[in-house]
Image: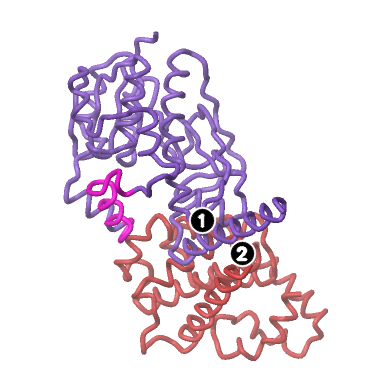
Amino acid sequence: MNKKSIIVFCPNPSSLYTVSVCELLLNRGYSIDHIIVRKFTFKRFRTEFSRDGKRLLIKIWKKLFLKEAAYPKGTDSLPLFRSNNKLKIRNVREFKKNGTKILYCNTLNDQIVEDTLKMYDDKLVVFTGGGIIRKNILDVAGDGVINCHMGILPRYKGMDLPEWCILENKTEELGITLHFMDTGIDTGYILRKVKIPLKGYTCIKSLRNSFEPIMVKSMVDVVDDYLNGRIKPLKQESENRRQYFIVHKKLYDLVDSKLKKRTTIANKKSKIQFI
Amino acid sequence: MKLQNILENKKSFAISDEYPFLNNKYIQGLEVEDAQIINNISAELILNDLGEYPKFKNLTFKDIIDLRILVHFEVANSIVYDWLEKILRYCEINYVNLKNNEKKYARTREDSIKLFNQIIALFVEYYLLENDLLFLNTALKITDIKWIVPTSSSSLSTKALRVIKVNQIHEIIRTLENE
């Protein structure tokens, strides 16, 4: 097995996405050397609130307080994936018993993070959230920082990409891309693209929830395959690339109504076939 | 043909300084075909005049009007697209600053209001030309900014433009919902 050090960037200590990725990596025999956690400070709250507004409050309520209870039961979601895979760890602190060091920082671009990364010679960084990564960190990140992007690159860069695929009637383009981060926005070398078929989801929230287990599994698979030389990063084509931005509330509602209509039509068709 | 619609609706534009080009005397009284030739030549001149995209802070009211005229003449070529994409990108990336700071973008507050209502109009018109929802999305976001709503001291044309474009956005959303 490859002996590269694995360092994980984490948005908050109880991120289900982070703990699931880390626990699955441990289950596959990897050791995680360091988890670098971004602290939730007032400054961070203010910056994110001015960007996301009310959405941030909902996100905090769900991710920091409700946690697994935020997901509807019995649907394709991260809690169901965790219970199917017998994943028990709920906080990054619990990884200490496996020898993982935990570092808390104000931002992932701090000097302390840079110094921590410099401690390891041969390393791979796994990004599970926590904000934009600057050049100073990318330069000392060894092989690079792997990110799971919620859209198919190079076409779909930016934010709210599942929503944009539905708005543009390009549901065949729904999916995720595992790539190395660089100084551009979603422009780094691609490791793997995973297309996700649109099943009978009637709202964008349930569709987004269904992405999470796929993101966790794909991240772990890609780390595993990369460390064992089974995949090679490919340079992105610069043509046909577009940056998307946060969807306005009115268009967001339109996404839900489009999904509902789609499901109703599909149900009607399936009933006719059944008769 | 869009030009014909514009010429038919010339009266409604006449009240505004948003369409100085269409109020130009040599359009008046011409047959549609003749006007079309003149306007196509003029569109080409505007396009040549447009040149490279400047920084957003150097963007003028005239630039936006030129772009709107080009969009009206369905000149959706790479130069026009490049300008529009850069304006959109600036508005999106700086949206937080845009919401909180009205003085930065033009000499006076009134000029800023005028400029951004023109940008809303440009984005909505471009959406209607190319069905590009990203432009409608940004137009919606800009309409939400409180300081961009024309004040009692704003010009009549800016107030009228705002009402027309906001209604147009609502109509577009209704159409999209029923699709």
Mark 2, residue position: B49
As measured in the structure, the alpha-carbon distance from the residue carrying label 1 to the one carrying label 2 is: 49 Å
Residue A204 percent coordinates (x, y): 47, 54
Q: Could you tell me the amino acid type at mark 2?
A: Asp
Please tell me which residue lies in front, B59 or A256.
Answer: A256
Residue B174 percent coordinates (x, y): 56, 74
Which color has been applied to chain A in this rendered view?
Answer: purple
The chain ID associated with circle 2 is B
The chain ID associated with circle 1 is A
Which chain is red in the picture?
B
Image quadrant holding the C terminus of chain A, namely bottom right
Residue B161 percent coordinates (x, y): 51, 82
Q: Which mark is residue A202?
A: 1
Give me the residue at 50% from left, 86% from top. Answer: B160
Q: Could you tell me the amino acid type at mark 1?
A: Thr
Whether residue B155 appears in magenta in the rendering, the answer is no
Q: Is residue B34 above or below residue A2?
A: below
Q: Secondary structure at mark 1?
A: loop
The magenta region covers A51-70
